[in-house]
Image (cartoon, rainbow, N blue to C red):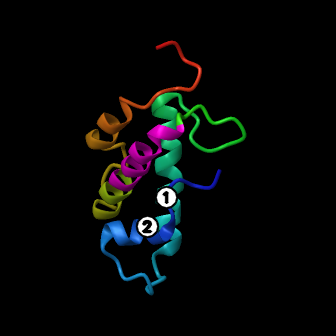
Amino acid sequence: MAEPVSLADLKEHLRLDASETAEDALLDGFMLAARRALELHTGRVIVGANPTLDPADLPLVEHAIKVTCTAWYENREGEQALPPAAIALMRGVVIIGAPA
C-alpha cells in the first residue's frame, strides 16, 4: 500500500500552491513521520506487508496524518508531538483480527 496521504493532498489541505516545490521534502518528511508516529502510538500497522488497519478506517488515518502535518508545519520551531486531535481521531481505529 502507498502512503495514505499524497503530497498533493497535503498541499491542498494546507492551502499551499501546488506548483511551489521548495518545501516538498519537508512535507514528505512530515507525512512519513506522522504516519509512523501514529503507528507507534496506536500499535497499528498502516503501511507495510501486513497492515493491521481496517480499510474502513483509512479516512480517519488520512485525516489524522493531515492534522498532524498541519500542526507540525505551523509550529516548526516547537515540539513535534502528536496533536491531541490526531490522537482522538485514532481512538476509533480498529485492528484487523483484534477481539471486538
In the image: residue 59, left or right of residue 55: left
Residue sitting farthest toward the right: 49
Q: Position of residue 49 (x, y in %)?
A: 72, 40
Q: Could you say which is closer to the camera, residue 18 or residue 75? A: 18
Q: Which mark is residue 9?
A: 2
Q: Could you say which is closer to the camera, residue 44 or residue 56? A: 56
In the image: residue 66, left or right of residue 99: left
Rendered view: 78 above or below 55: below
Q: Residues within 10 Å of mark 2 (few under 14, many from 20)?
A: some
Q: Position of residue 95 (x, y in %)?
A: 52, 26
Q: Residues within 10 Å of mark 1 (few under 14, many from 20)?
A: some
Residue shown at the point (52%, 61%) measured from the top left: 29
Q: Position of residue 10 (x, y in %)?
A: 41, 65
Q: Which mark is residue 80?
A: none
Determine whether the residue tagged by mark 1 lies in a helix, strand or loop.
loop
Residue sitting farthest toward the top: 99
Q: Main secondary structure of the magenta part?
A: helix
Between the residue at mark 1 and the residue at mark 2, the CA separation in whole angstroms equals: 6 Å
Determine whether the residue tagged by mark 2 lies in a helix, strand or loop.
helix
Residue flagged by tag 1: what amino acid is it?
Val
Write the start and end of the magenta stretch as one range: 55-67
Q: Which mark is residue 5?
A: 1
Residue shown at the point (54%, 31%) measured from the top left: 44
Q: Disc 1 vs disc 2: Cβ atoms closer than 8 Å?
A: yes
Residue shown at the point (34%, 77%) measured from the top left: 16
Total numbered badges shown on the rendered structure: 2
Residue flagged by tag 2: what amino acid is it?
Asp
Q: Position of residue 4 (x, y in %)?
A: 52, 53
Q: Could you say which is closer to the camera, residue 18 or residue 84? A: 18
Q: Is 96 included in the stretch rendered in magenta? A: no
